[in-house]
């Protein structure tokens, strides 16, 4: 592909060794929700804040690396995906310079998405341990606590290129919370608490990514999509 990654380096001290020593097998996408990319980089490199990411991509598509991929960057915080609890040890974190508008109408910039695409292909080429299913949003691993990369992120477009997954062969199914919970767990979701609020947070996170226009009670669409995801991409237990 003719696209010079031209990655700048701006190192953050907010990192450490990966626990268990194995190479990363997940990618977590974030948005910064900050005013501009420079203030985000400063924050992600300031020891006071104890946060970082491996990469940040500006609206113009400029990529800055802050933590070496071999190290454990502090981007994910508390959360779970499938069987993984220490997401930071398992993942590469990528921040997008993006601040959602109140009515959620702000699209991501084209150059930024293009740079993300090239960076993801570059990482996946180098790291066969990372499968498409394990490119997730911060909201997926931390329902109710995190909402990024938000409802405007074009998951379907990325999934078509093999950079993520998207449901197919969706069948209608009557709403049933027990079945929804079971399928959501098989796909990888984990509620912050195993109660009504916790599962509503999972439903919200799942919709942010797969059915961003869906609201209200658990629906036939929710059921069809979550069952397709569980059938096609079960977590290896
Ligand atoms: Zn985040």
Image (cartoon, grey):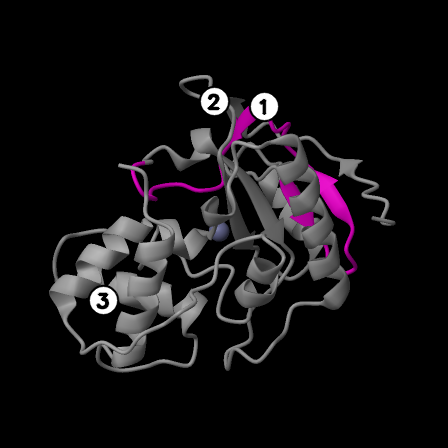
Identify the mark nearer the N-term, 1 or 3.
1
Asked if residue 33 shows in the view, the reply is no
Q: Position of residue 58 (x, y in %)?
A: 72, 55
Residues under numbered marks 2 and 3 in contact, where contact means CB atoms less than 8 Å apart: no
* Residue 170 quadrant: bottom left
- Ligand 1 within 8 Å, label 1 CB: no
Mark pair 1, 3: CA separation: 35 Å
Asked if residue 11 shows in the view, the reply is yes
The verdict on residue 63 being magenta is: yes
Q: Main secondary structure of the magenta part?
A: loop
- Point out the stretch of residues depicted in magenta: 55-83
Tell whether 230 sits left or right of 157. Answer: left
**Looking at the image, residue 214 lies above or below residue 17:** below
**Looking at the image, residue 22 lies above or below residue 89:** above
For mark 2, what is the residue? 18
Q: Position of residue 207 (x, y in %)?
A: 37, 70
Mark pair 2, 1: CA separation: 7 Å
Mark pair 2, 3: CA separation: 32 Å
Give the structural element (helix, strand or loop) at label 1.
Answer: loop
Q: Residues within 10 Å of mark 1 (few under 14, many from 20)?
A: some
For mark 1, what is the residue? 70
Residues under numbered marks 2 and 1 in contact, where contact means CB atoms less than 8 Å apart: yes
Give the structural element (helix, strand or loop) at label 3.
Answer: helix
Give the structural element (helix, strand or loop) at label 2.
Answer: loop
- Ligand 1 within 8 Å, label 3 CB: no
Q: Nearer the viewer, residue 175 or 195?
A: 175
For mark 3, what is the residue? 200
Q: Residues within 10 Å of mark 3 (few under 14, many from 20)?
A: some
Q: Position of residue 175 (x, y in %)?
A: 18, 76
* Residue 98 quadrant: bottom right
């Amino acid at each position: 592909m003719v696209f010079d990654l031209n990655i700048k380096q701006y190192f953050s001290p907010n990192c450490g060794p990966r626990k268990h020593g194995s190479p990363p097998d997940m990618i977590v996408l974030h948005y910064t929700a900050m005013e501009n990319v420079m203030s985000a980089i400063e924050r992600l490199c300031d020891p006071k804040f104890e946060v970082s990411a491996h990469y940040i991509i500006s609206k113009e598509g400029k990529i800055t690396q802050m933590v070496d991929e071999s190290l454990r960057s502090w981007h994910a915080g508390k959360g779970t995906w499938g069987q993984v609890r220490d997401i930071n040890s398992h993942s590469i974190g990528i921040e997008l310079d993006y601040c959602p508008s109140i009515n959620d109408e702000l699209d991501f910039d084209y150059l930024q998405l293009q740079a993300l695409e090239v960076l993801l292909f570059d990482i996946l080429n180098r790291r066969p341990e990372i499968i498409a299913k394990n490119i997730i949003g911060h909201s997926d691993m931390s329902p109710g606590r995190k909402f990024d990369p938000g409802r405007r992120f074009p998951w379907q477009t990325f999934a078509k290129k093999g950079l993520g997954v998207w449901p197919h062969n969706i069948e209608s199914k009557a709403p049933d919370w027990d079945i929804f919970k079971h399928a959501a767990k098989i796909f990888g979701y984990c509620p912050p608490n195993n109660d009504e609020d916790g599962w509503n947070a999972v439903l919200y996170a799942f919709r942010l990514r797969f059915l961003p226009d869906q609201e209200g009670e658990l629906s036939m669409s929710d059921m069809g999509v979550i069952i397709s995801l569980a059938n096609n991409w079960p977590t290896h237990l």
